[in-house]
Image (cartoon, rainbow, N blue to C red):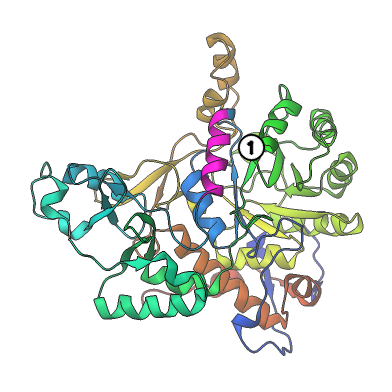
Amino acid sequence: MRFINEPTTDLTYADVFLIPSASEVSSRFDVDLASDDNTGTTIPLVVANMTAVSGRRMAETVARRGGLSVLPQDLPGEVLAEVISWVKNCDTVFETPLHLTPSNTVIDALHLMHKRSHGAIAILDNQRRLQGVVRASDCEGVDRFASLEMVMRRNPLTFSSSEFADSPVGALRTAFDRFEAAGVSYAPVVDADSTVVGALTRKGTIRSTIYTPVTDASGRLKVAAAVGINGDVAAKAQNLLDAGVDVLVVDTAHGHQRKMLDALAAVKALDPSVPIVAGNVVSGDGVRDLVSAGADIVKVGVGPGAMCTTRMMTAVGRPQFSAVYECAQTARELGASVWADGGVRHPRDVALALAAGASQVMIGSWFAGTHESPGDMQVDSAGKQYKESFGMASSRAVQNRTQSEGAFDRARKGLFEEGISTSRMYLDPKQPGVEDLLDTITAGVRSSMTYAGAANLAEFRERAVAGIQSAAGYEEGRPVPLSW
């Protein structure tokens, strides 16, 4: 990247814009979004290890589209192992279906439907054989305690798993045509004896021809997990490695400290065969020390997250664009990579982080308000759906993290918080699922790369031309939904 007007101060994403260059890249589909940091991701997006954001449904969905989710360190080890196994047993094309039995009630279905954007549930017998399908519209105007057998649609559109064995792309095109002809957007996938093995959606058939899943050597979906720097770090890391985690993230808010270096040494002593990520830092010196201690990838960002109050509480941090730019330059000199962690609110911000040198961009709160995040769906007084999010340095997160400690010690630690404990993340009715957001983000990044004449992320870093703008310049670029 080069600047047309050299910065004289540190910059955040709103301070920067990109200038179009001569380009031989004629189509967004000619752009390769695969990362080059040995994680294997095919889109440069990582779901942050926040309890309110990253869970099994998020990990499955994002991995199927080529990204990576980092499971949070606050979960018990046995739960992490179970989730890792669950994700790795998910299909790389078919969604894991929501399912109930004919004897379940309408209210059971309504409580479950918000777990997926398609709003449909497969009705199975005790042998997992398909009996019917219930959609949200089938539950309108009926007794909520009526059995699903009374409202389910029998003989729904279905697909056979064998259809996708030889020519998946051709089968996906055919499936799309069948969805169009049937006028529906959801269908179960069954095997030869009508056992349900997955689900397809109309939009999913299109996405599966655009995205490439991120998979391990055995063809299973990849998932990452975080470990803190306190306690027996080596034992916790070994448990995650034994569970089959594909990327290990050694995580703390202040990564440039002795305990982090000791934790990295303990992890590297295990001789892991997976990439090791460590952070967070915001300086070249921090990158050097973490890479020297064993990190393959360094997480960059202190204070830019939507749930983070660190900068207001402590004055510590750094504008994120400059932090990523400096840290990425240092990492490249050392043969390492950086993840830009936090501060992105629009696709342009993701593009700028990648242009500045990040191999991937971590997203937290932006993904919290989706069907796939772990939180319970809630509705405000105006009928708008939302999920609660909270920062990982908030008193709420600290209380969760210190459950095994005594009440007095937990109360003491709860006094020191640097994050929001409760925030409403509203679902966008037009983009309620994480896949909708992935579509929007990757479309913006692909287009940004074509403007720069870059066919891959390495070329994007090399060819990007940036300028510094005023607040008025940033405001000028915002769309105007209503006439002025």
Dominant SS in magenta: helix
Q: Is residue 224 above or below residue 76?
A: below
Magenta stretch: residue 82 in it?
yes
Find disc 1 in the rendering and name its residue. Answer: 243
Q: Position of residue 325 (x, y in %)?
A: 78, 60
Q: In the visual, does 191 lie left or right of 258?
A: left
Q: Foreground residue, 57 or 290?
A: 57
Q: Is residue 90 left or right of residue 314?
A: left
What is the magenta range? Answer: 78-89
Vertical order, 457 against 302 (above or below): below
Q: What residue type is labelled 1?
A: Ala
Tell me the quarter of the image containing the C terminus: bottom left
Q: How many marks?
A: 1
Q: Is mark 1 on a helix, strand or loop?
A: helix
Left or right of residue 201: residue 236: right
* Residue that sits furthest to the front in the current view: 193
Q: Which of 108 and 16 lies nearest the eye of the viewer?
A: 108
Q: Name the residue: 62% across, 51% down.
A: 342
Q: Which residue occupies 75% across, 47% down?
A: 274
Residue 124 or residue 270, whichever sits in front = 124
Q: Can residue 15 be seen in the rendering of this structure?
A: yes
Q: Quadrant of residue 153?
A: bottom left
What is the x, y in percent for residue 432? Answer: 38, 59
**Can you say whether 261 is above or below 302 in the image?**
above
